[in-house]
Amino acid sequence: MQMKSIVTMTALLGFLPIAPVWAQIAANEHEFQQLSAALKANDAERQSAIAICIKQGIGDHPAGAAKFMGVPVDRAAEAWCTRMTNGIANSKLTLADVNALNEGTVTPGARAVLKIASDGKYNLRPFPSFRTVPAY
C-alpha cells in the first residue's frame, strides 16, 4: 500500500459522522491492518494524515461532533481527525468501527476513541481537582 493512498484514505475519516456517503477507507481487514501499521510506524505520515483531514473538515455542521467529543466547535475537526487517526494507528479502532461510523452508528470502540482526549488538548474538567493537604 502506498503512503499517498494511506493519507488519502485516512483523510476521509474527517467526514464519517457527517456524510455517510464516503467509500470505505479499506477494502478489507488486511488493507486496514496495513493502514494501521503504516500510521503507527511513521509519525510524519500520521501527522500528514491528520493535517489533510483537518484541512478537509468534518462537514457543514460540526457542532454535533464537537458536543459528542466534548470540545469547542472550532476545534472539532482537529479533535476528530487526531482521535480517529490515532485510534487507527494504535489499533483502538477496527475496520468494523470505521464502517459503522460511515453508516451513522457509533460503536463502543469508536465512542471510547472519540470521547477520550487522546490528543491531550481538550480534556478539561469543569472544576479544578484539588488534593487535600494536611494542615500543619
Image: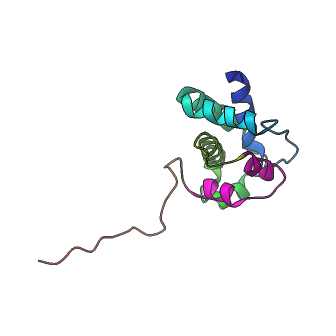
Q: How many marks?
A: 0
Q: Residue furthest front?
A: 30
Which of the colour schemes (rainbow, by chain, secondary structure, one colour) is used? rainbow
Q: Residue furthest left?
A: 136
Q: Residue furthest right?
A: 21
Question: As displayed, is residue 68 above or below residue 57?
Answer: below
- Residue 34 position, x and y percent, is 68, 32
* Nearer to the camera, 106 or 135: 106
**Image quadrant of residue 30?**
top right
- Residue 3 position, x and y percent, is 67, 23
Residue at 78% over, 36% down: 26
Q: Residue 106 colored magenta?
A: yes
Q: Report whether residue 47 is seen.
A: yes
**Image quadrant of residue 81?**
top right
What secondary structure is the stretch in magenta mostly built from? helix
- Residue 135 position, x and y percent, is 16, 78
From the viewer's perspective, tell me whether residue 48 is left or right of residue 131.
right
From the viewer's perspective, tell me whether residue 65 is left or right of residue 112.
right
* Nearer to the camera, 13 or 121: 13
From the viewer's perspective, tell me whether residue 51 is left or right of residue 12.
left
Q: Residue furthest bottom?
A: 135
Q: Report whether residue 56 is seen.
A: no
Question: As displayed, is residue 119 above or below residue 51?
Answer: below
Question: As displayed, is residue 10 above or below residue 117?
Answer: above
Question: As displayed, is residue 24 above or below residue 65?
Answer: above
* Nearer to the camera, 86 or 31: 31
Q: Where is the C terminus found, in terms of image quarters?
A: bottom left
Q: Where is the N terminus found, in terms of image quarters?
A: top right
Residue at 55% over, 28% down: 42
- Residue 15 position, x and y percent, is 77, 44
The stretch of residues the image draws in magenta is 95-116
